Amino acid sequence: MLEQQDVTAASPSVDDNVEPGSLSELSPLAYRLDALATWLYWIAGIVLACAFLAALIVISTSVDTLGLVSPQVESQSRVAIAVALIGAGFAGAGIVAGLGGILKALVRRRDL
């Protein structure tokens, strides 16, 4: 049987290629790109929060359409618009977070 030390030493960590002091050893450009990637993660969260807020506003408003659309159709279309807003928020947040992840992975490579 393996001891606990051997198991932890044999299993690869997520950040095996990133040493603790490696962020301070990055070039100025790489350091700025790493900071940009971190900001992209935060922006993805803000995009998602804004999508939920917009969906909540759409659901809770009762805007009159000047009689052009019946109230039943209007309430059903509000739900569809709210679902579309939440879906667009997830898609937008996923794209921004994915770009941040790709940038962070490229910056933290060993051969940089």
Image (cartoon, rainbow, N blue to C red):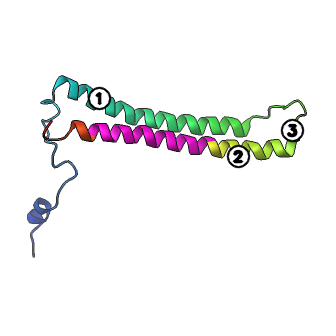
The earlier-in-sequence mark between 2 and 1 is 1
The earlier-in-sequence mark between 2 and 3 is 3
Are circles 2 and 3 on residues that touch, CB within 8 Å? no
Are circles 2 and 1 on residues that touch, CB within 8 Å? no
Disc 2 residue crowd, few under 14, some 14–19, many 20+, Cα 10 Å: some
Identify residue type, mark 1: Ala
Q: Which residues are magenta?
A: 85-104
Residue 19 screen position, x and y as percent:
13, 42
Magenta stretch encompasses residue 93: yes
Residue denoted by label 3: 69
Magenta stretch encompasses residue 88: yes
Identify residue type, mark 3: Val
Q: Residue 88 occupies which quadrant of the picture?
A: top right
Residue found at x 22% / y 27%: 31
Question: Where's the N terminus, which quadrant?
Answer: bottom left
Identify residue type, mark 2: Ala
The earlier-in-sequence mark between 1 and 3 is 1
Residue denoted by label 2: 80
Residue found at x 21% / y 24%: 29
Q: Nearer the viewer, residue 99 or 11?
A: 99
Residue denoted by label 1: 35
Residue 55 screen position, x and y as percent:
64, 39
Residue placed furthest toward the right: 67
Does residue 57 appear to the left or right of 19 in the view shown?
Answer: right
Say which element carries label 1.
helix
C-alpha gap between disc 2 and disc 1: 37 Å
Query: Of the numbered discs in the image, which one, if any, rests on residue 88?
Result: none
